[in-house]
Amino acid sequence: MDKERSFYERLKEKGVSRRDFMKYCTALTATMGLSAAYVPKVAEVFAAPAQRPPVIWLHFGECTGCSEALLRTQYPYIDELVLEVLSVEYHETIMAAAGHQAEEQLQHAVEKYNGKFICVVEGSVATKYNGGYGKVAGRSFLEIAKDVCPKAAAVIAIGTCASYGGIPAAAPNPGGYKGVGDAIGIKTLNIPGCPPNPINLVGTVVNYLLLGKLPDLDESGRPLFAYGKTIHDQCPRRAHFENEEFVEEFGSEEAAMGYCLYKVGCRGPETYNNCPIAKFNDGTSWPVEAGHPCIGCSEPNFWDTMTPFYEEM
Ligand code: FSX
Ligand code: SF4
Ligand code: F3S
């Protein structure tokens, strides 16, 4: 109870009311596909976590947009969100340590939590030339992944790069970049998107803490609660698609009227993600709502299969 009280006090100090927090928990519970009866339990996971699983967060070939997306989760604030429910032992972007000290911290965390930590991987792994196309502190991504990932209780690939290769793996892919699972031959839970929606990582972790297991996955390793339906099937412009009301040119009257973006290249019909429901930046908007076609950023090999963008499929 005390733990809980101080959590709400800390939120209040940051200008977040209990009511706002409950609103967030309601949205998160719905995203996870759980009934409203779970909302108080979801709130409890943040307010009074029974356990804080240790997390080792690795960075490989990527733009760090995945971390950026997570760090821009204003609500609940990143420290409340991540540091209250997870014990982040290593994360290059947000840790204070640098250089040799950081390397020591990684080794120390892997040894201390061997078999118990969640490994979150951001970015893809160079596999050609013995992994020579991507290194941290003189060790290749490949070597680090082979060393750290098998010691984890679960490996979560965050972003399309870590899940399937992403932009570093785009043709002609000289470095032989692959998603981390493919690169070292392990199964990963994938949260693709370039960048992914942070709520889907939070939902996965809360699912684990609440129900004691990872969520159900599709055959591409994606949680079904987030990637079970296409963008097209959840799109508010769908009626325009059915009525054959299309935007033919950006900046046109049809664009202003919010017509369907299919003819200017929307890949919503073949992209599985929950962007229309979850939205980004605390539910502010998402690509199609902002007038931009979906480019299929959460699908495997989208840089090769979905391009040229802005042309009808
Ligand atoms: Fe990849 Fe993450 Fe795209 Fe970037 O770091 S999924 S390039 S938005 O962000 O890995
Ligand atoms: Fe489908 Fe895209 Fe049109 Fe929405 S804008 S209805 S996702 S084609
Ligand atoms: Fe990506 Fe399409 Fe959503 S481009 S962010 S999957 S709308």
Image: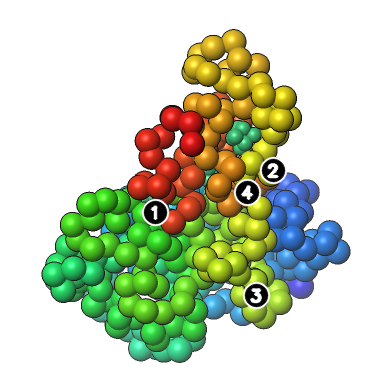
Tag 4–tag 1 contact (CB < 8 Å): no
Q: Residue shown at 49%/57% (left/top)?
A: 192
Query: Which residue was labeled with disc 3?
Result: 209
Please, which residue is most extreme toward the top here? 253
Tag 1–tag 2 contact (CB < 8 Å): no
Find the distance from the CA under tag 3 to the CA under tag 4.
Answer: 27 Å
Query: Which residue was labeled with disc 2?
Result: 234
Mark 1: which secondary structure? loop
Tag 2–tag 4 contact (CB < 8 Å): yes
Q: Can residue 90 be seen in the rendering of this structure?
A: no
Q: Which mark is residue 230?
A: 4
Q: Which tag, 3 or 4, sits closer to the chain's start?
A: 3
Find the distance from the CA under tag 2 to the CA under tag 4.
Answer: 7 Å
Task: Estimate how packed mark 2 is, as few (under 14), some (14 to 19) or many (20 or more) residues with alpha carbons within 10 Å.
Answer: some
Find the distance from the CA under tag 2 to the CA under tag 3.
Answer: 28 Å
Q: Which tag, 1 or 3, sits closer to the chain's start?
A: 3
* Disc 3 residue type (three-letter): Leu
Query: Which quarter of the picture shows residue 300?
Result: bottom left
Tag 2–tag 3 contact (CB < 8 Å): no
Query: Which residue was labeled with disc 1?
Result: 301
Q: Which one is in front, 79 or 65? A: 65
Q: Nearer the viewer, mark 1 or mark 2?
A: 1
Please, which residue is most extreme toward the right here? 37
Task: Estimate how packed mark 4 is, as few (under 14), some (14 to 19) or many (20 or more) residues with alpha carbons within 10 Å.
Answer: some
In the image, residue 244 sits, relative to residue 47, either above or below, namely above
